[in-house]
Image (cartoon, grey):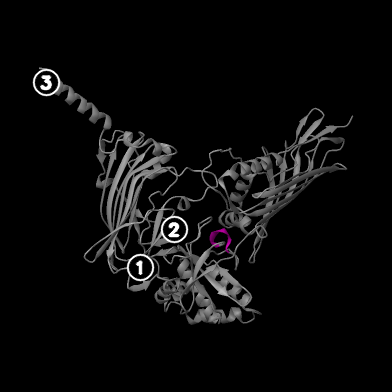
Amino acid sequence: MKQLLLLFSMFISMTVSITVVGGEYPVSAIPNELLKNANAVIRKQEQVIEINSLNKVTLRDHYVITILNEAGENEAYWMEYYSRLRTIHHIEGALYDAMGNKIRTIRKSEIKDEPVSSSMTMVDDDRIKYHNFYYKTFPYTVEYESEVTKSESMFLPSWTPLNAKNVAVELSSLTLISPIDYEVRVKIFNSLKPAVVTTAGKIKTSIWSISQQPPVPREYAAPGIYELAPYISFGPSAFKLGDYTGSMRTWKEYGQFIIKMNSGLTDLPQSIKDKVAQLTASAKSDEEKVKRLYEFMQRNTHYVGIQLGIGGWRPFSASYVAENGYGDCKALSNYMVALLKAAGIQANYVLIRSGENERDISFDFPSSQFNHAICAVPLKQDTIWLECTSQTVPAGYMGSFTGNRHALMITDDGGTIVATPRYDKNQNTLRGNFSGIIDPEGKLNLQAIITYQAECSDVLHGRIHAQSKEEQLKYLKKSLDIPYYDIVDFSYLESGGKIPSITENFHLQAPNYSQVSGKRLFIIPNVLNRWDNKLDADTARFHPVVLTDERYESDSVFIALPSGYRPESLPKPLEIQTPYGNYTASVTIKDDQLMYSRTLSLNRGRFPAPDYNKLVKFYEQVYKADRAKVVLVKSE
């Protein structure tokens, strides 16, 4: 009897143990050190890249992630794309509860299948399959498995086991399988252990892995995840894309592949050649010819993203663009090269990674790192850069979309790395001149003239050319930091050139701008341009501070005051100098005239983590100074 009781007790104990542990992926099994700062935890990630030949690359993925809270929901989304060059063979998925018990698997009908782009300016043959359980009981776990075959070897996926901040990793591995005599160049970022390499016959297998990796916390102005977490980029040596073969061992060889792929695409119809001759006949310099032909291209074409054929990488011909009046970045840049060639001016097709605040390419590692094409015209005096997808950007200006970075220029010999124009505080400026009148009831009538230059004008330029007059007014009315006001009228004047500018002119009325309290009148002299970035102090900062905004602001305010008031309290003149930026402000009153002057200079740079709280203090000082009040008292 005692033996039966002992056996029964052991059975109950085992059952309880199993119940506590749960199923295959119980949340309770996640180490505590991975949960701190985590919104999600990757339980298992197995990525396999198998290079069978230049015409066949197989990708297998097994991905298990636990979503801890609502902030981690984006990580539960699965997506894969397919095209003429890419086939999805199978997709499997499952949902687990907090105990790790399987709730259900995905049904085939639940997997969405849509075009990659639904935009009217995109034409492509790529499609995506995606899935999300949209489960809302946290924490939970999702698992996905998929297999894809690519019929090209130009683009090998990178390995990013930590692909987002506030995500931890229990175990992640990458397996690269390739013929032993095939060269795949590898660039490892951020302290990753060497691969475990084995060979079997003519096949080489390399395995990289990480485990028990805590999350990278999200911090203000911290470096991107690509600087903080381990990852691997691959550069194939020989590769094939459609009917074209090439090499990426050097940038020169990569450029030679682009030359081969773009060969024969710059021929123009005779009517366009005649138009080129007509437009350039009276031009007094090559620079003027470039400007005229660029503006001709802008007037007569528009952007349509055409991602057809071999991955969308071979441009449509210049004659196609001429006849149809549209093209994608590659086709329009190639068309611009053809127009200039017809005028006897050498121009170059350029590959670049575009995007505001986009990280620069690894220019010491030849590989496919580009998502955009532009045109460069190297003249004797200077190189003119042309953004061919825009119908409004002036010739020579790159802005925040493609400026301040490196690119691959395709020359007659191949490819060479070049730098695009850099814009700093000398170009990125904002200058405001404000003149107004305040009446005895505190009503402000103000005339504002603000000039935005270079990158400071980029957002406004986009609004002017994308919005109607009514939409512009609506935006302007919502953007000013004044409680109650009305815009009486407004206008914009653009000035082109390599450093473009926009002058904004508007008349504003604010009925209660100044507070009236008994005999006193309270005025904030900084009428419109107030710093609004306040940060919380952090004594446990992990990462360096990376500041990317570099600009110079200056404001001059002249306000006529109601008669009979004298200053009771004025803000003291202020001057702040820091490595992150400088600030000055001063206010004077003379003969019922308030005069206010302000400058703010912001520096681009990288600063050590302990400097963060100094940056917090600088921002706080500017925030308070921009809201400092003048107090006037009515004379007896």
The residue labelled by disc 3 is: 3
Q: Is residue 404 above or below residue 294?
A: above
Q: CA distance from mark 1 to mark 3?
A: 73 Å
The residue labelled by disc 2 is: 120
**Image check: 435 left or right of 144?**
right
Residue 310: which disc? 1
Q: Residue at x 31, y 36 (%)?
A: 29
Q: CA distance from mark 1 to mark 2?
A: 21 Å
Tag 1 secondary structure:
loop
Amino acid type of the residue tagged 2 in the rendering: Met
Mark 1 and 3 residues: CB-CB less than 8 Å, in contact? no
Amino acid type of the residue tagged 3 in the rendering: Gln
Q: Residues within 10 Å of mark 1 (few under 14, many from 20)?
A: some
Q: Quarter holding the N terminus?
A: top left
Front disc: 1 or 3: 3
Tag 2 secondary structure:
loop
Q: CA distance from mark 3 to mark 2?
A: 77 Å
